[in-house]
Amino acid sequence: MTIFNGRKAKISGTGVYIPEKIMKNTDFEKFLDTSDSWIYERTGIKERHFAADGERCSDLAYNAAVAALNDAKMSPETLDMIIVATNTPDSTFPSMSCKVQGRLRAVNAGAFDVLAGCVGGVAAIQTAVSGVVSGLWNNVLVVASEKFKDYVDWNDRSTCILFGDGAGACVLSTSNEGEGNFISSKISADGTKHDFLSNETENSGDPHVIKMKGQDVFKYVSINLPKFIENFCEESKITPENVDFWIMHQANTRIIDSVFKRVGISIDKTLLNLEQYGNTSAASVMIALDESMKKGCVKQGDKVCFVAFGAGMTLGALLYEV
Ligand code: UT7
């Protein structure tokens, strides 16, 4: 089942928090055998942000949450649920969402985390929308937050140059006629490819450090994502040409280019911010969503498709009418 049934759910507000500290490609040249030109040409990344010393993943999440609530003009007491997607939590427990709930004093909200690789942002929104359309919740805060600074292997030039820290958030609420409306969503998984991208102890000897088979991930996504998008659009009763704007997971501009070419989507119909932020994993679609809303890339009535892919391997999509 791809289509949401029941009540309608809309985006009431969005927000981001990007830590101040910038690390440029040229900074990597000082301690790795790499270059600004290699990184930019192979990935589209120029710089990424990293959390300050002492700044935790939950702090990034909290700051993005405050920004989204301010944008929605809602107080924390109105929230029924807080969902945080992350792959780089301060701790496995308690959840990041409980820390956010506590700091917000969101006294009426439950809280849990979602751990779903780079598809985490899409998975968290899908869960929140399901709760709203079913009548379980009225207002849900969804946050995606990543602090890769503690999780990358700084000696591995093929991975540490890719990731960056940041958080994005949105408030989802019940919707009336003429307001925004989530139409459909889909997540697929192929767990036989779980070793393409992982931080398992058995791989690295360190439970945190990311290990990636970059070319395998690249090929898997380039081959499977176009078919996934076409099937998702068909099941959602829309053609890719009729999608007005695409909110894409920002992993590599070459991947987005290749997928768009195969599906026949114009690059003008998306926003690329890899150059400034690198890959912020689960947070990347949330950051791209906020930027697209604030820059006026989408207008009322537009059909917007969110697309993400990542560790698992997993692919995910959401269709939203603004
Ligand atoms: O969020 C989803 C998860 N991740 C992704 O989507 C990542 C998908 N994969 C990729 O984006 C690309 O595979 C990478 C950017 C990670 C690597 O690019 P590539 O074009 O696939 O390079 P490669 O792994 O085939 O390596 C080509 C060469 C190798 O050298 P040799 O063996 O040909 O001498 C690498 O050692 O490039 C070398 N290399 C580098 N050289 C300079 C790898 N990383 C670097 C680097 N600087 N940072």
Image (tube, grey):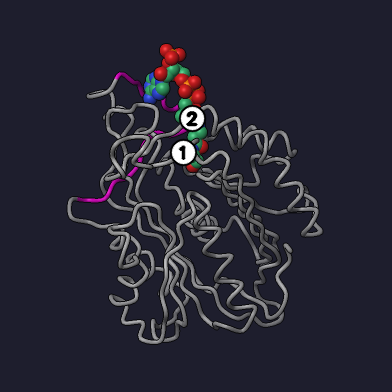
Please tell me whether mark 2 sits on a helix, a strand or a loop: helix
* Quarter of the figure with the C terminus: bottom right
Identified by mark 1, the residue type is Leu
Counting residues from the start of the chain, the first of labels 2 and 1 encountered is 1
Q: What residue sits 80% from the left and 53% below the top?
A: 234
Rendering quadrant holding ligand 1: top left
Q: Quadrant of residue 178?
A: bottom right
Q: What residue sits 54% from the left and 47% below the top?
A: 249
Identified by mark 2, the residue type is Gly
Residue 45 on the magenta segment:
yes
Q: Nearer the viewer, mark 2 or mark 1?
A: 1
Q: Percent position (x, y) of residue 248?
A: 57, 48
Q: How many callouts does the rendering have?
A: 2
| Crowd tier of the residue under label 1, counting other residues whose Cα lies within 10 Å: few below 14, some 14–19, many 20 or above | some
- Answer whether residue 42 is visible to the viewer in this image: no
Q: Residue furthest front?
A: 202
Label 1 beta carbon less than 8 Å to ligand 1: yes
Please tell me whether mark 1 sits on a helix, a strand or a loop: strand
Magenta-drawn segment: 33-52
Q: Which residue is mark 1?
A: 197
Q: Quadrant of residue 203?
A: top left
User: How far separated are the C-alphas under marks 2 and 1?
Assistant: 8 Å
Q: Which residue is mark 2?
A: 214
Q: Nearer the viewer, residue 34 or 321?
A: 34
| Crowd tier of the residue under label 2, counting other residues whose Cα lies within 10 Å: few below 14, some 14–19, many 20 or above | few
Instruction: State whether residue 73 is above or below residue 190.
Output: below
